[in-house]
Every structure is written in C-alpha cells, then in structure tokens.
Image (cartoon, rainbow, N blue to C red):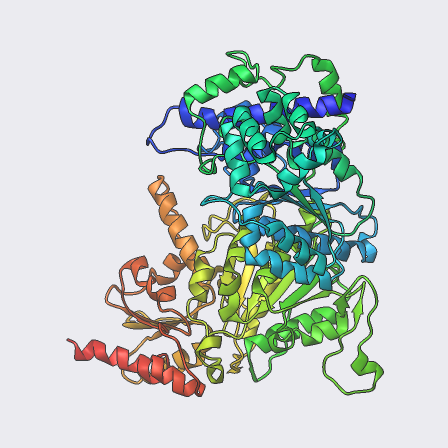
Amino acid sequence: MTTSRTHLKTIEQRLLWLSHWMIHNANHIRPKADGIKVGGHQASSASMVSIMTALYFSALRPEDRVAVKPHASPIFHAIQYLMGNQTREKMEAFRGFGGVQSYPSRTKDIDDVDFSTGSVGLGVAITSFASIVQDYIQAKQWGQELKLGRMVALVGDAELDEGNIYECLQEGWKNDLRNTWWIIDYNRQSLDGIVREGLFRRVEQIFDAFGWDVIRVKYGYLQRAAFDEPGGEKLRDWIDSCPNQLYSALTFMGGSVWRKRLMDDLGDQGDVTALIDSRSDDQLAELMENLGGNCVQTMADTFAAIDHDRPVCFLAYTIKGWGTPIAGHKDNHGGLMNKTQMAAWQAHMAVPQGKEWEPMATVSDVPALQAFLKEAKFFAKGRRRYTDDVLPVPEIQISGDREISTQMGFGKILDDLSKGRSALAARIVTTSPDVTGTTNLGPWVNRRKLFARKEQSDTFISENIPSTAKWEFTPEGQHIELGIAEMNLFLLLGAAGLSHSLFGKRLLPIGTVYDPFVARGLDALNYACYQDARFMIVGTPSGITLAPEGGAHQSIGSPLIGMSQDGLAAFEPAFVDELAVIMEWAFAYMQKDGDDDPDERTWLRDETGGSVYLRLTTKPLEQPSKRVNDDFRQGAIDGAYWLRKPGPNCSVVIAYQGAVADEAIAAAGLIGENRRDVGVLAVTSADRLNAGWTAAQRDRARGNPDATSHIETLLQALPGNCTLVTVLDGHPATLSWLGAVAGHKTIPHGVEHFGQTGTINDLYRHFRIDRHSIVQSVRSLTAGK
C-alpha cells in the first residue's frame, strides 16, 4: 500500500469515527432539555466518507467549490475539525443552539462552506449556475485573471427525484457548461425505502443526452482484484445481477450470510468456491462491501484521471451505513447506533475511552499524517472567502413623463445605465426566464448584448429583417438568457449574487419574472436568501392590474412573500421617481457587508445589506411634479411617506401601496368633500415598515423606551378615533396590520380571490379596490353609528 493510499485510508477512518461520535454525543450523551431525538444521519454520512476523503485530500484545489450533500454534513464538519477549522465546542453542540449546523451553511457555520445545502436538490443545481457565472466573469476584461475552478456537487441518489436538477441540465447544455462535477452517492436507499432497480441506466441516459461524461464507479480495489482470480467473473456477474434490496439486506446480516447466499446461488463450482473459501467471514464481508464509492483509493484514482473541463457525472456505488453496525438496513436513513452498538463499534475502531474527540486518537505516525494534511492542496490557501470593492452608485434619475408605468420606468432606468460607462453598469448582469422583452429588459439587452462564451450573430440582423430585439451573443454580453423555469432563475441569481465571495469579483444580478410566477421558484428564492446571495428580483407585471391576462397571470400573495422572506427587502412603488430613489438605494444595499453601525432611526438592519424585490406594474399613472425633498426620498426608502399630510382633525387616512395610487388619491378627494384633514399615506414597502415596527417593539421589551420605528413616527400624531383605510392590488393582510401600530380602526381593501379577464376598471370594481369602493367604506363609518 502506497504512503498516499495509507494516509487517505487513515483519514477516512478518522472522519468516519469523528462524524459518528459527534452524532452519538448529541443523541445519547449530551443532556436533553426536551427529550426529542436530535438526529444526524449516521448512515448517510458513512456512505460518503470515502468519496469525501478522496475529494478533499486528493482531488480538490483552492479554486474548486463544493456543495456537500445535506446528510453528509457530519463528514464535512469532521473534515474541518481535523484541519483545525472547526472547534470541539461547536462539534459537541452539533444540532444544538450555536453548534455546527444540521446541514452545511455559509452564514451559520464557521467552517468554510462554499454552498449552503439542506433544501434537497438545490445544492446540486446551483453548482452548474456557479460554473456559468465563473465563465461569465472570466470572459470580461475585468475578470480575465480569474483562475477557473471546478464546481462540485455531492449528490444523494434520492435527490435525483428533484425536478430542478433536470431543469438545470438543459440550461447547462445551452450555455456550454464546463468545469462541473456531480458525484452521486448511489447507495440505493432513501428515507422510505430502496431505490428502484435500473435507476442508474436512466441517469446515464439523461446526462449523456445533455453532453455530460458519465463515469460509473462500481467496484473497489478488493473486488477488482478478486475478479482477476479464478472464478472472479462469476462473482462479478452475481454482483451485477443482485437486486438492490437483497444486496442491502445481505450487507446488514454479515459475512456468514454472504457466504451461504453466494454458495446457494453459485453452487460448488470449484474456482468460485475456492475464491469464497479463501476468505474468512469478515474478509468476505469486506470484499462484498468494497464497492467503488466505498474505496478511497478507487475514488482518488478516478478523480485524478479527469484531464478535461467537460461536465462529469460520477455514479459512485456505495453502501448506506458502510463500515458501521447499521450498514445496509432499510431503516438506517434516520437510524442511530444505540449505546451498546456504539461501544462495540468503538472497540472495533480502536478508539480509547476518553480520546473520542482527539483528531489523531488512532494514528500510529502522527507527524507523517500531519505533514500529509499540510500538503492537501484544497486547504493550502486557508479560508476561501473573498470580497471585492464596493462599486460607487451613480445618481439615478428619470424623465418626468406625464403618464408612465413603473415597469416602463424600470426599463428606462436600466437603459440610461446601459448608455453610461460607470463601473456599476459594467457589473450588472441581467437574466429572465423567457420574458426579457415583456418585462422591459429589451433596451438594456440591445445595448449590452447577451452572454455566450463564443460569438453568435443575430440571423434577423444578418438577413436584414426589422426587429426591435437585437439578440447578439458575445463574451462581453451582460444578459444571460434562460428558458421558462423560475427555479433556474433564482438559482442563477443565487450563484451570481455570491460571486464576490466565491470568485472575488462583484456582480449586481438583476432578474425579471412575471410577478405571479415568483411562487414557482420560491424554494430557490429562499435558498438564495439563506446563503446571503445579493441580487435584485423584479416581479412585473403584478396583480389583477394585468387585467386582460386573467387569473393565471395575476398575483395576489406576492406582497406577503416579500414581507415574510428573510434577506429580501420588498418594495412596491407607485411612481417612477420613487422607483429611481429605491433602485439607487438598492444598488448600495446589495453591496453592504454588515460593517456599518445599526440604524437606530428606523430599527431596520440596513447595515447588513441583502437582496431586493421590486413589485412593478404595467399600469401607467400620472406622475407627480418633481420631488426632491429629503422627507420624500428617505420615506420612499424607509417604506412610506405622507403624500397628503393629515390635519389636526383627521378622521380618515387612506394608506395605499402600488398601482392603486390613483384610486386612493381620487378617493381622498371625494371624501374630502365631507371630511376635513384627510391624510394619504403612500406606502412603498409594507415589508420595511413592518420589519422596523417589530424590531422597535423588541428593543423596547429589552429596556430601550426610546426605540421608535418609522411607521410609529408617521402615525403618532393621528387622533385615536381616526380610521385607516388600506388598499393595494394584492392581499389585504399586506397593510391591514397598520391599525395595530397605534390602535386605529382599520378597513382593509385588497384582493383575496383569483381574478378573471376584463378591464382594469372591471376588476377594480369587482374586488373593491376602486375609488368608489373606498368611499363607500368611509361612508359606512357614519352609517354604522
């Protein structure tokens, strides 16, 4: 056995022990406050240990990035602990408060996590988009020094049921994907049972169709050596024809059962009988369980043999729970070794009592292994979290067209940026799931072009066919074309929104999508925010205001998504001057890193930065005269401002958000005929208003009586008998909470049911978000007395 192979085997066994001891400690030793099982997926970790040992200590380089299978988190943390990048204290608190996370997390773990995983399947797909982003950066003049790395995903075979994995394969093919490895832990067991027979054949066909190399890693060193012995081909044929369930069951039952079954099936055939008889029960079990994915040297050799940049799918056969007493049992997905099993296994692993947490507890030549670990290329440059300079944000202004929609205003703002030469404009990358033209990205794309690693001309231009869209693909292009798959949109935004950290080059990603279809990609949106990716998502057109399109294209709950999604500041401006102010702020907000002082004026966490969601519409509105005062600008950013300040005898305030601004303003005029001092509150972000209000309440509860949020400041002068009438083209709960701020009666207007086709006026009247319905609600106050 070579020195390298010996060290890899030693590391493999150390990782197997440390990961399982960490889980055992959390479930059977650490005091429990609530008596609930902690869990930790020992079997799913064990099946990956050889693969991850070979990967991290033989194949990877500092520029490579890895998305670790969620249930292999214990192995990942054990690797970092072995390398001195994780603390024993946090290992002992595994799955506890402040301890290492159940699944690797970029934002919650202190060890060097490249991609958060946990929403099953998404950690796989994001690696392909990260590779595309890497190519995008290197193609630019400002990114040519970037050293390309491999984007690696460790994949559980049950994750192959996730549809987003196959959606991203098509985008990879269209974008000439390279430098991507997916390593499938083919242990053939999932949470509820055994994976169907023949799955690997389907997997191979799918990947092959999209231009991937597929490498099947089925046999380990011991098995390949046995196959060369007399009778070895018969043993190989038996292994190849053995059903998944039977192989798992025999693994769990052990060597003597293996022997009986093999003899029963193969019979007394001389050569194969001699092959079996030459091994003890333990040796026979070791042979039969020596699948390719459980052989560290086989995996190291397989990785080392790749000498190209084509995408590769490694189908690594493994045994779930390999090397432990629960190997192969169909219930082992969430199963744990009990104390008796663990004690026996500890003796088998030769770990002394009291030395369970010692990284080198069973190592015979500690200096030699430490020297080997020091030479591991992946860890050679230390922590691989990068950063990039903050890009200055140019002043964003927009011409005051008499009537314009916020969607058109968004397109004009980007078009103005595309005409300039600012550093910020050079780092903007736009993308859209086949709705580029209808979400007003067209002018930007025409000027800044589409991205491809190789030039592709627009046939309509070369054939002199008039078209408003100039679809030229070039390495300098700044728009990435996507098909109709919103999951891919948010995965790409997530990858691009991490570019400053992953690759040391900041991008400002902007994605557009029809607002109702934000929900189609909601899991990937949440995943991107959980990683603290930075991007702008523009949902447009929105609401029933998209009247002729009918209910399928009309959004209702998306404002509530914007309010509830952590890491995402949601806005719904009504006027384009608001939009300009918000976008200028947003480009700076997307680049914040948390180093600034907390804002005690609004109690929002603006110093930490985040992503931004704009909910826009196609409905043109008459624009107000030019507004440059600080109250307006700051109010638009903080979430609201007084469009019409209430007087001292105010009995009604109309609070609106978004496209219904004209209805709210007109209703205020009609109400003002009979009521004095009517106020109109322009809400640009119910999300930020609500977040500031709840944060201020928390701080008051902690003993700071002066904590006051922006919305509390705005409403504090209203008389107690004043009524708030809220209205938006979205779910009424978005604004109905405003009455709880200071105890005012509230009448909410909004949309709660699927819409239908019709004119805007038809639908506004039907859902009672028109001016006359608002007036009726106010009149009912008097009628009810």
Horizontal placement of 782 versus 682: left or right? left
Q: Residue 346: horizontal and vertical position, in percent? A: 52, 17
Q: Which residue is more in the foreground, 529 or 684?
A: 529
Regarding residue 173, the answer to whether it shows in the image is: yes
Quarter of the C terminus within the rendering = bottom left
Horizontal placement of 719 versus 384: left or right? left
Q: Which residue is more in the foreground, 339 or 271?
A: 271
For the point 19% across and 78% down, the residue is 782
Q: Residue 52: horizontal and vertical position, in percent? A: 65, 35
Q: How many badges with numbers are in the image?
A: 0
For the point 68% across and 36% down, the residue is 234
Quarter of the N terminus within the rendering = top right
For the point 52% across and 45% down, the residue is 118
Q: Residue 233: horizontal and vertical position, in percent? A: 71, 36
For the point 54% across and 14% down, the residue is 355
Regarding residue 19, the answer to whether it shows in the image is: no
Q: Which residue is more in the foreground, 316 or 623?
A: 316
Task: State the image quarter where residue 783 is shown.
Answer: bottom left
Q: Residue 219: horizontal and vertical position, in percent? A: 69, 36
Horizontal placement of 572 versus 186: left or right? left
Relative to residue 323, is residue 496 depicted above or below?
below
